[in-house]
Image (tube, helix red, strand yellow):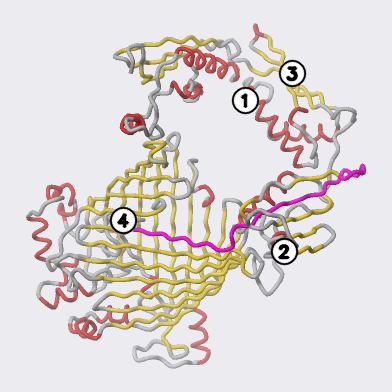
Amino acid sequence: MKDNQALVRKITIKGVDKEFSELAPKYVDKEQQPNNWLNLQFYYLFSKNGKRNIGEPPALLDSNLVEYSRMQIEKFLRNKGYLKATVIDSVHIKKKKAELIFTATQGPLFKIRGFTDSIKDKRVKALYDQYHRDRAHVRPGSRFDTDSLAYDRDELYTVMKRNGYFDFYRQYINYNYDSTFNKSAVDVEVVIDNPAGRIEHPIYKINNTLIIISRSSSRIAGKADTIQVDSQFRFVDFSKKFKPRSVTDYIFQKKGQIYNVDNQALTTARLSELNVFRNVPNPTYTKLADSSYRLDTRIDITPLKRMSNRIEGEFLFNQGRYGYNVGNTFTNRNMFKSAAILQIKVNWSILFDNGTNTINRGNIENQDFKVGVSLSYPRIITPFHFPILGKYGVPHTTFASNYQLFYQKGLVTRESFINSITYDFFETPDKRHTITPISIEFSRGRIDEDARLQLLKQNRYSYVYLIGRTIFTSGSQYTYQLNANKLNSYNDFIYFRGSVDVGGNTFSALSKAFNTKRDSTGKRTLFGYEFAQYAKTEIDLRIYRNTGGENQFVFRINPGIGVPYGNSNQLIFEKNFYAGGANDMRAWLPRTLGPGQFNRASYGVGPDADTARASLKYIDQFGEIKIIGNAEYRYRLADNFFGSKLKGAVFMDFGNVWRLGKKDESPNGEFKLGNLWSSTGIGIGTGLRFDLTFFVFRFDVAFKFKDPQFTGSDQWVLLKHGGELFRSGSFKESYKANNSQESYNFMQLNFGVGLPF
């Protein structure tokens, strides 16, 4: 900085009512606001190389902007009812750092004494009276607040637009003020004028609607498919790719109804939500030449490219272990000319292990391959008539088929096939229901023969049964979501997602009705296969609290329970809960925490124990009960970091999975209220989020703080054994000796796309 320059580092505002103490500093000019320290350091770092769009330039003291800020604060206070308010400014400079001090003398608060109106149109006055009685912000006795008056003006304008007043403008609404300075009182009169030369405002009704769909290039050329759908809709499609119903179902402006701006906005929103159109502007209107006050509507739509492809990935690293998750989604946005969306998703997860513990060192430890096909229609499809539930969101009927192949080298190959029909619809903008009336699943496992014999030799038949059985079942699911539409906001709200999954009851009834035979274990069969019966429920509850700007605190609790019954004494392998990974217990790799206080050292020592421990890795740590909790504080670091917003996070994760009852294969893994605390894991960490607007790239580093596989004070691994974080010591050596030379890892790195929750 030059000798005559100073950096603004602090703003102090005195004499302002506590109610407005947080708002007043925002009226200081942006260029005089103190810099975010990190933003400023980025600017200093990169501006030397000519990259001045990185970070934030220094807020240098400018006397003209200080005076402008003083005037803005004074205006703000007067708008809030302190009509005699004055503000003076002063600047304190020390070591080239400036503090701006604004001192306000507010004076008396002016309140509204009388509130009258002058409205000549009787119909408009009736609407105004109802609004003023039920919803107005400004009333006799309230603060004289010009911001509230402006709010009431905008709300009243919207009321008019909802009731047919297409030609109504804000300029028709005016306020006259008469203030008595000695009594700190203001008399307010609202005036709503009629259009020039008219005795009342006309009310318009909807007439005909013209729908024009251009090509995806936005061109309107060549021959179009033209259909006169009915007395209202004329459909012109230059793309030749849509049926009229795909659009007309979500046009909420009907012929003969009065014009309503809400129906206009609803039409635009729902057509956009179909996710097949690139551009859906507000409709345009033409007044009929006669005196009938009718409006012809024109809706111009540009479709998205019909086909698209998206690739996603995630990477995990933990000392000798590393893995990745790669997914590809192909989308056809307009099947059968009905705005139905076809998606083909392929996902491949693979985990390598270079640790000394595994019999497959340096090779693939396990793989999980998934492929799914879904066809989603933007309406409810049933054998009987069902109304269009589009007021609060586009409903869907989704037909889906999924195939999953899980492979663990030297142990098992499991396949599952799932076919389902799902309906989802919105009760309100915040409440969403998802119903899967039928889901049919067939799964089978093939255990490596050597591994099967080894497990049987160690009396671990339950694992042979869990991962090796062939099973057939049908189920139904229901999910309720609250406030999912607010997840990308910084508001204060509560998010809730609750699901129920019940399976096997229909097959059980059929089996009993036809008295089907039982298998060698005594289980009833259908079509020659054992079927499963179970009930499973899970809750995801989150509390979001804004702490200023883009800073946010999130608390999440995610419990669940699955109960086998009837024809089953174990859940299907895929229905169990697991802990660990980038989205819940981030200090643990997926499938490496729990159940309860289960310790894999319990396999014992020796070749047989080492083989079993290696074979069942990522398989044996499951449970029928899950309780996961997360507390995360998210904060802004830099507004411009190589084209992205840089944000940070600190977090704590806690929880585990547990077995439902005591199981020989999972010693100390059962759920008990008495040992809930001792069997709960805790992880802490920090991370960076690179917000690129369209998606968020995330990097987290997490540390095990309390590890429930140990006992007593040894559970507090970071406190008691933190000295071995980056080196070997007695704790790690002891762990190696009892776990087939496997290393203990305090730290976990997670890379991913999107927020964890």
Check disc 2 and report the residue beneath it. 245
Q: Earlier in the sequence, mark 2 or mark 1?
A: 1
Q: What residue is shown at x 64% (from left), y 17% (from top)?
A: 111
Mark 1 touches mark 3? (CB < 8 Å): no
Q: Residues within 10 Å of mark 4 (few under 14, many from 20)?
A: many
Q: Residues within 10 Å of mark 2 (few under 14, many from 20)?
A: some
Residue 124 in the image: state x and y as whole percent: 81, 34
Check disc 1 and report the residue beneath it. 147
Which label belongs to residue 394? none
Q: Earlier in the sequence, mark 3 or mark 4?
A: 3
Which stretch is magenta? 288-314
Which quarter of the rendering shows the N terminus?
Answer: top left
Check disc 4 and report the residue beneath it. 585
Q: Earlier in the sequence, mark 3 or mark 2?
A: 3
Amino acid identity at mark 2: Arg
Residue that lies at the very extreme toward the right in this rendered image:
290
The part of the image, by quadrant, that contains residue 190 is top right
Q: Earlier in the sequence, mark 2 or mark 4?
A: 2
CA gap, disc 2 and disc 1 = 44 Å
Mark 2 touches mark 4? (CB < 8 Å): no
Check disc 3 and report the residue beneath it. 176
CA gap, disc 3 and disc 2 = 50 Å
Mark 2 touches mark 1? (CB < 8 Å): no
Q: Nearer the viewer, mark 2 or mark 4?
A: 2
